[in-house]
Amino acid sequence: MVAANKNNQSERIVVDAAIQLFSTKGYHGTSIRDIAQKSSLNVSVISYYFSSKEKLYLNILKRIYCLLEEKINTINSLDLKKQQLLSFIDVTSEFALSYSCLMKIFLQEIVFNISMESRDIVLKILHLHKSTFVKIFNEDRLDLEFHFSQKANYYYNFITGTISNTWMLEQVDDNHDENISEKINAVKYQIITLLNLK
């Protein structure tokens, strides 16, 4: 049992080091030796858990998917549409703010597409995120599905665009904490108003 805990701890240390390095140096700018040095572990230990740098990278993308899926399950467990929409905004903003390194890796992958497998995982993440919003938005409106699916796309882009912009500003603004809270609250208020959910 002690050995299993130590193995899990070593794997977690490797993944944490890789997340930090991939988010700052990019996939191609990071070597297995860099990760070994950052994690204070031997290269062979990293190879034991992940047979290649790409496998480690894919593992991180899969973790992003699993993390999002867990958050989406929480959203789906809520009864009221207003609660679901607000929770969706909270989850989207939480990814940008609390998982900044994962967000950087995710955005880098959208631009650079390391492999077909990594691209497929990113597409799954995007689909899960967007389809969750569209499902909440279109609920009980099946008779006007086309009309509202168009609006759903508009509001989805509005929410994700505003939050992404907030996240990008955070990267360059020293007083980002106050700005982020203000912007997220403003987004929530605008969405509630636009969807007449007051």
Image (cartoon, rainbow, N blue to C red):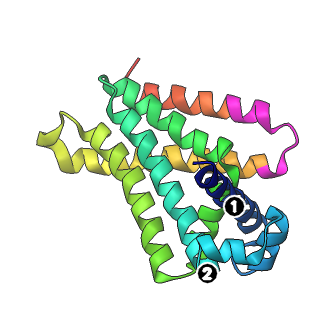
Residue position for label 1:
19
Helix, strand or loop status at disc 2: loop
Question: What's the mark number on residue 170?
Answer: none
Magenta span of residues: 171-181
CA separation in Å, label 1 and label 2: 15 Å
Number of the front mark, 1 or 2: 2
Q: Residue at x 39, y 34 (%)?
A: 75
**Does residue 66 appear to the left or right of 42 in the view shown?**
left
Q: Decide: few, some or many residues near mark 1? Use Cα within 10 Å; few <14, some 14-19, many ≥20.
A: many
Q: Nearer the viewer, residue 190 or 124?
A: 124
Q: Residue at x 33, y 35 (%)?
A: 76
Query: Mark 2 and mark 1 in contact (Cβ < 8 Å)?
Result: no
Q: Residue at x 65, y 50 (%)?
A: 165
Helix, strand or loop status at disc 1: helix
Q: Nearer the viewer, residue 43 or 86?
A: 43
**Does residue 46 appear to the left or right of 88 in the view shown?**
right
User: In this rendering, does residue 52 appear at all?
Assistant: yes
Q: Amino acid at mark 2?
A: Ser
Disc on the earlier residue, 1 or 2: 1
Height in image: 132 above or below 37?
Answer: above
**Does residue 42 appear to the left or right of 191 in the view shown?**
right
| Magenta span: chief secondary structure | helix
Q: Residue at x 72, y 72 (%)?
A: 26
For residue 8, what is the image quadrant? bottom right
Residue position for label 2:
52
